[in-house]
Structures are given as C-alpha cells and as structure tokens.
Image (cartoon, helix red, strand yellow):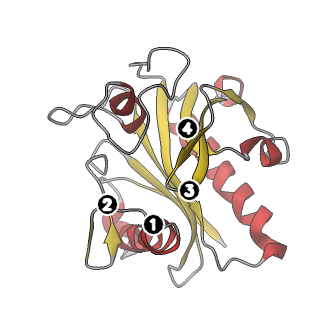
Amino acid sequence: MHSTTLSFANMHNHGELLANILRARRESFIVRNRWELPETMGMEFDQYDTPVSRWLAVHDSAGRVLAGVRMTPTTARCGIYSYMIRDAQRGLLESIPADLLDEEAPVDGGIWEVTRGFVAADIAASIRQQVRLKLVLQMMRTAREERIRRMLALLPSNWNRWAARCKLDMRAAGRNMNMGGIDYQAVWIDFAGRLQ
C-alpha cells in the first residue's frame, strides 16, 4: 500500500494516478452517493480541481485508488471561485448550505481546505482503518511540506469516531448538515504542532 501527493508539478511522474483518483471519486460520489456532479470519461471533477490544489491518494502498486482527498489553499482564486467551503458560505453553491461555518471562512496561506475525501466502498473492513490512517499520515506529510498549520475539512459527521484513532486534533467548525442524504460537518484539523 502506497500514499502519494499529486500536484501539477509532479503528476507526470505518476502515470494515470490523478485520472484514477478522479475515477474513484466518480465511483464514490456519483455512482454510490448518487450526487449530481460534473463528470467526463468516467471521472468526477469540479471547478476546484485546479493547479493550486493537491490530490492525495492511498493506492496499490497497480494504481488502484483505495482512498483520497483534495487539498486547496484558502488563498485560491479562479474566476469567481475561491475554495468550496468559502464559496458555499458566499452563496455560490446550491448544494451546500451557506451557514455551514460558525465563523467567516478564512483566507490564509497557512490554512488549506480538505474536500472530496473518500475511502473506496469495497475496501475490506479489516484494512479500512489502515487505509484511513495511511491517508492521514500523507496529509501530515503534505502539511509539513506545504507549511500548513490548519485544515478546514468538510467531512461526514461521524468524523469524531475515527479522529482519536488517527491521532488528529479536530474540532467542529460548523453545524451538522444533510447533503445528498449524508450528514456532513465542517471541521478544523490542527497541524501546527506537527510541522517540525
């Protein structure tokens, strides 16, 4: 089992891994969750998949993606869009309530957003926690490389069940919301103590 952080600067070194992440996202969000999201060539994508983002994946040697997330700096700008959580708060997204945060969405180079997180549905229960932990370790590695102090994530509301097992310092950043039949919540993840 491997973990990789992809960017526009290094994706050429990893074959089809980015396409495989987007295929796995389609399977998770469009096929399994039945969300109406943009897709093409069997891949899910949106306006936040830009060169400023990073895509993290846990994958096997053949490139099959077991889990993944997208990370975007809160300083991102592309046309009228910034990052998903902030744009939802600004009322630009119909599918996410504008009152998802308890405070104003940050714009800070040391804070990044984490969205589109998933673990493939067919991952055996016996290794599911191992896959999740491998993804969290890759997030920590990326936080050190990018000097990220905090992350603002949009996660299923059961995040507190596995946060302690993954040794993450997490706290709620907003209310529980039902989106597409699944309860979600904005959550702060503190990485400041792990940057050394």
Q: Which residue is mark 1?
A: 25
Q: How many marks?
A: 4
Q: Kindly identify the amino acid type of the residue bearing the numbered disc 2.
A: Phe
Q: Which residue is mark 4?
A: 153
Residue 181 has which mark? 3
Residue 182: % across, % down? 59, 54
Secondary structure of residue under mark 1: helix
**Residue 63 versus residue 83: which sits nearer the camera?**
83
Work out which quarter of the rendered image holds the N terminus and state it. Answer: bottom right
Work out which quarter of the rendered image holds the C terminus and state it. Answer: top right
Q: Which residue is mark 2?
A: 45
Secondary structure of residue under mark 3: loop
**Residue 169 versus residue 161: which sits nearer the camera?**
161
Check whether the beta carbons of the residues at disc 1 and disc 3 lie within 8 A of each other. Answer: no
172 relative position to 53: left or right = right
Q: Residue furthest top?
A: 103
Residue at 47% across, 32% down: 112
